[in-house]
Image (cartoon, rainbow, N blue to C red):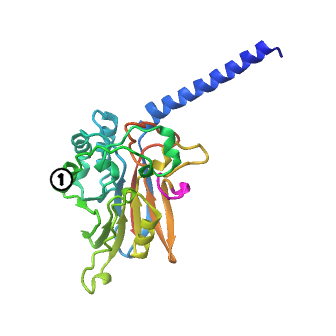
Amino acid sequence: MGSSKLLDATTIALGGTAALAVAGLGYASLVERNLFQLREESLPILPPGSRPLRILHLSDIHMAPRQAAKTQWLQGLARLEPDLVVNTGDNLSHPKGVEPLLEALGPLMQIPGVFVPGSNDYFAPVLNNPLRYFSGPSKHRTGREPKSLPWAEMFRGFGNAGWIDLSNRSQSVAMGNLRLDFTGVDDPHIDRDSYAGYPAGSSTSSDARHLKIAVAHAPYQRVLDYFTAGGADLMVAGHTHGGQVCIPGYGALVTNCDLPTWRARGLTDWEHEGRSIPLNVSAGIGTSRFAPVRFACRPEAVLLTLTAR
């Protein structure tokens, strides 16, 4: 083959590769990040004789103004009629995100709920080279002072709806003939976690039907270990975005914490000190407004149906 023909073939190949890359980026930014889905899981972990309990797990909404598709989808989740909503943080992505967030969650806030915050409830995301996301947890690489977000306004909105703040605290909630004992932590990703244990209750409280649920934003291994050692029956978390940009057939490349990548989304069992506890990690609903892409990792809410053992 002559040099000119070889050059032409190389140019065509490079052009085709570039076109595929552009098409993939367009799909990831314009299409997949709005392909919201509901993942459903069933767990037989309730005490014998308990009626089924439906928990809607929301995480990483990253709300900003003018996100109509996300708002409409979130509002529609109320049709599932869950018994409880668990929100594992990173609800905001913009200083003016609280009002649209509360609008989107309005129908769900008529349902009992608990929540913990993530770092992007406190601080706005910053513009970084997106390739640096693959170098390790993001808290170690920013040299700028982050801008504060109106987290207190969000907390008030949730609190006015009766949702319980589990930031470094515990609380029991009655659900029919079952007592749910919650423990939660503030965001481990920015080292704000301080484990409070579970509600002590009375000397005979362990005799009543109960379930221990642990809630965190970022599923760092140290957090999962102390939740498990403390007697958790179920752990829920978010933060990972499921990897956000994944390889089809392989999965996540990163989790933005020390959780193994194969646990970046979904229901797995966490083992520690001889105990094996279900862990649900949500792939999340939104993205940072500076990295509005998802590839092979659709946004999700999770409906956990708990049934009797």
Residue 124 found in image quarter: top left
Q: Which residue is mark 1?
A: 156
Q: How would you rate the neighbour count of disc 1 (Cα within 10 Å): few for under 14, some for 14-19, many for 20 or more?
A: few
The C terminus, quarter of image: bottom left
Q: Is residue 102 above or below residue 183?
A: above
Q: Is 262 within the magenta? A: yes
| Residue 309 appearing in the image | no
The N terminus, quarter of image: top right
Measured as percent of width and height from the top left, residue 244 is found at: 48, 44
Measured as percent of width and height from the top left, residue 94 is found at: 29, 39
**Relative to 106, 235 lies left or right:** right
Magenta span: predominant SS is loop
Q: Pick the residue in front: 238 or 110.
A: 238
In the current view of this chain or complex, which residue is farthest to the front? 143
In the current view of this chain or complex, which residue is farthest to the right? 1
Residue 248 found in image quarter: top right
- Residue at position x 37%, y 48% in the image: 60
| Residue 293 appearing in the image | yes
Q: Is 193 within the magenta? A: no
Amino acid at the residue labelled 1: Arg
**Relative to 201, 38 lies left or right:** right
Q: Pick the residue in front: 74 or 125.
A: 125
Measured as percent of width and height from the top left, residue 185 is found at: 33, 64
Region rendered in magenta: 256-263
Q: Is residue 37 above or below residue 217?
A: above
Q: Is residue 272 above or below residue 246?
A: below
